[in-house]
Amino acid sequence: MNKNLSITAFLGLTAIVLGAFASHALKEKLTVEAISSMETAIRYQMYHVIVLLFVNSYNGFTEKFKNKVSLFFFFGILFFSGSIYLIYLLGVPVKAIWFITPLGGGLFVVGWLLLLFFFMKKVINKK
């Protein structure tokens, strides 16, 4: 759990740093569309950092479940947000990594489905 929380804290830190960097240092260098894409990547990263804090602090989850959900969200952030950062910060051509962003989005969906099924099972079993 502490490893997951350490990774989560790092991802939170990088979201804040990248947000500040994009809004100040890159404001004049990126197009409005690029800034919008960067903001989306940063926002999705931060949303999932907050969920990761909940997942890894919630006592109702087993360590195995925490690790499983965390991996989906960690890789979702890496692929979804990371691919957008590569495109706009390092100039990686979109054509080279076009499939990575939706793959990250799919990983987010799987993580959320795992949480949905967990809590729906509790509702059905009334526990």
Image (tube, helix red, strand yellow):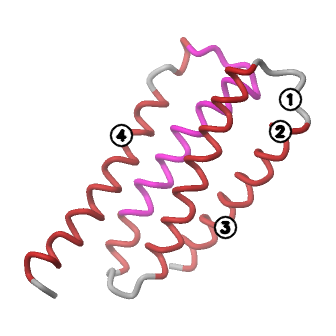
Q: CA distance from mark 3 to mark 1?
A: 26 Å
Q: Which residues are magenta?
A: 69-94
Q: Which mark is residue 23?
A: 2
Q: CA distance from mark 2 to mark 1?
A: 5 Å
Q: Given the image, on which type of amino acid does mark 2 rest?
A: Ser
> Which residue: 86% across, 30% down?
26
Q: Which mark is residue 27?
A: 1
Q: Which mark is residue 9?
A: 3
State the residue in front, 90 or 41. 41
Q: Is residue 88 left or right of residue 41?
A: right
Q: Given the image, on which type of amino acid does mark 1 rest?
A: Lys
Name the secondary structure under disc 2: helix
| Residue 44 percent coordinates (x, y) | 55, 47
Q: Is residue 33 left or right of residue 29?
A: left
* Residue 127 lies in quadrant: bottom left
Mark 4 lies on residue: 106
Q: CA distance from mark 1 to mark 4?
A: 30 Å
Q: Nearer the viewer, mark 3 or mark 1?
A: 1
View extreme (left): residue: 125
Mark 4, Cα crowd under 10 Å, few <14 / some 14-19 / many 20+, is some
Query: Which is nearer the N-term, disc 4 or disc 3?
Result: 3
Q: Nearer the viewer, mark 2 or mark 3?
A: 2
The answer to whether the residues at label 2 and label 1 have Cβ atoms under 8 Å apart is yes
* Residue 3 lies in quadrant: bottom right
